Image (tube, rainbow, N blue to C red):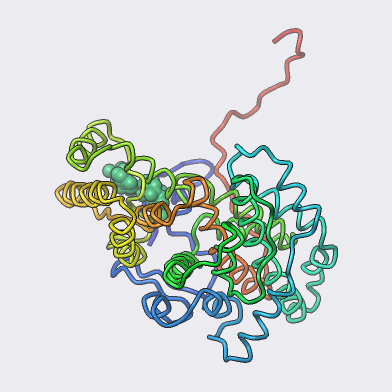
Amino acid sequence: MAKFMGRVEFPCTIELGKGLEGAITNITKIGYVDGQEGHLVYRGYSIEDLCENSNYEEVAYLLIYGNLPTASQLADFESKMRAERTLPDEVKELIKSLPHDCHPMNALQAAVAAMGCMDHDGLEVTRHVSNPKESVDVERDVAVRILAQTRNAAAAIARVRKGGDILDPNPELDFTANYLYMMSGEIPDETRRRVMDVCLILQADHGMNASTFTAMVVHSSLADMYSTIAAAIGSLRGPLHGGANEAALADIQSIGTPDKAKEWVASRFAQNEKIIGFGHRVYKALDPRAVVLKGHAERLCREHGFNDLYESAATVEKEVTTRMEAAGKKIYPNVDFYSGLVYHALGFPTPQFPVIFAVARTAGWVARVLEYLPENRIFRPRAVYDGAVDQKVVPINQR
Ligand SMILES: CC(C)(COP(=O)(O)OP(=O)(O)OC[C@H]1O[C@@H](n2cnc3c(N)ncnc32)[C@H](O)[C@@H]1OP(=O)(O)O)[C@@H](O)C(=O)NCCC(=O)NCCS
């Protein structure tokens, strides 16, 4: 049921769901967010189960193909991704030539768009919708290519900023270990790989969020998958969405010491400012992703000497939720509040946080647009015109 947001009497009475609140885009089998109880499910599997008993590659396969892979399906999937051994030289050159102080999300968006310029077959696929089944099969291969190459580009962008050479994936490593390896040049230990894997699984898909909807809208015009993913990256970048993890960490760091956290929250409330890393359109209970990440954040912060940072965050959480409950609002920490702490403790520069999110979410983006393709209809909502009518153009020298 759409929350009533306003009533406009032009040209007829309508109900406006601001931010498309309550609007339904399609029927999906990919994932489900239970905002009341705080559950997130990918194709029937809870994220807790997937984090415990699978890895990111299996989850990406699950989202894109519809089932958890058998050993041979996984081997085939891995070999398709391994075929994307290296970024095209033109994309590597582009990444090197961009200013190293530009935001890495802008660089990633440019790199994905540039990949499209190099993949002529990939650009043609979507247009052949006379046989949607065949179109989905062919475009799924393009999607798998993009999944691997987006990770490669993300790692290359991080690496170049540290002054390193762009590395190709190591064929001995899985998706996540390769991502870490290509960023740092070091093969990660199992603990590090596992935590990163959990982060990627938790961010792989999440209902009809802004970037997923962006992907759906772009692809619904039968634009190619590269344009689709580049647009979704742009949508994810903002602080109300995937950019919240970097903004949340910056806020916690700005507090200084844990004893100042209560005062910091009080001043935010006094100025009526939103606390980044809290709240969600769908969750009216604890975000289950934040629950998983909080445990990792605490452990990693204690192991890596960020005790104060973790204590400040925990105090902010307690203070904000207490104040919100007192005001009758169901506002809790979301995934971005604790993912920032995890990434910081793992040693990633803050601007890379939303890039990691984008790498993970690419699986969800491609899965959702592929699911929609056989029944494709271009998205075309309407706006209510509430401006002037019957204006006449006055010549410029008389205005
Ligand atoms: C996620 C978010 C964009 C959802 O926005 P939304 O569904 O449009 O929700 P609204 O902004 O309409 O908020 C609803 C109410 O909760 C309050 N609220 C929501 N998030 C809040 C926050 N982070 N801090 C303080 N108050 C918040 C709003 O002020 C509003 O109160 P009101 O009804 O008294 O006006 C919003 O919660 C937000 O801006 N959070 C901070 C950014 C963030 O962490 N984004 C990552 C999301 S995973």
User: In terms of depth relative to the viewer, which is nearer, 17 or 134?
Assistant: 134
Tell me, yes or no, if residue 5 can be seen here: no
Farthest right residue?
120
Quadrant holding the C terminus: top right
User: What residue is shown at x 62% (from left), y 74% (from top)?
Assistant: 371
**Image location of residue 290, percent across then percent down:** 33, 62
**Image location of residue 127, percent across then percent down:** 80, 66
Q: Give the answer, above or below, for where 190 lies relative to 214.
A: below
User: In terms of depth relative to the viewer, which is nearer, 246 or 398?
Assistant: 246
Seen in the image, is 138 located left or right of residue 10? Answer: right
Farthest top residue?
398
Quadrant holding the N terminus: bottom left
- Location of residue 6 by image quarter: top left
- Location of residue 44 by image quarter: bottom left
User: What residue is shown at x 81% (from left), y 75% (from top)?
Assistant: 130
**Image location of residue 97, percent across then percent down:** 74, 41
**Image location of residue 32, percent across then percent down:** 43, 72
Seen in the image, is 9 located left or right of residue 122? Answer: left
Tell me, yes or no, if residue 358 can be seen here: yes
User: What residue is shown at x 59% (from left), y 69% (from top)?
Assistant: 368
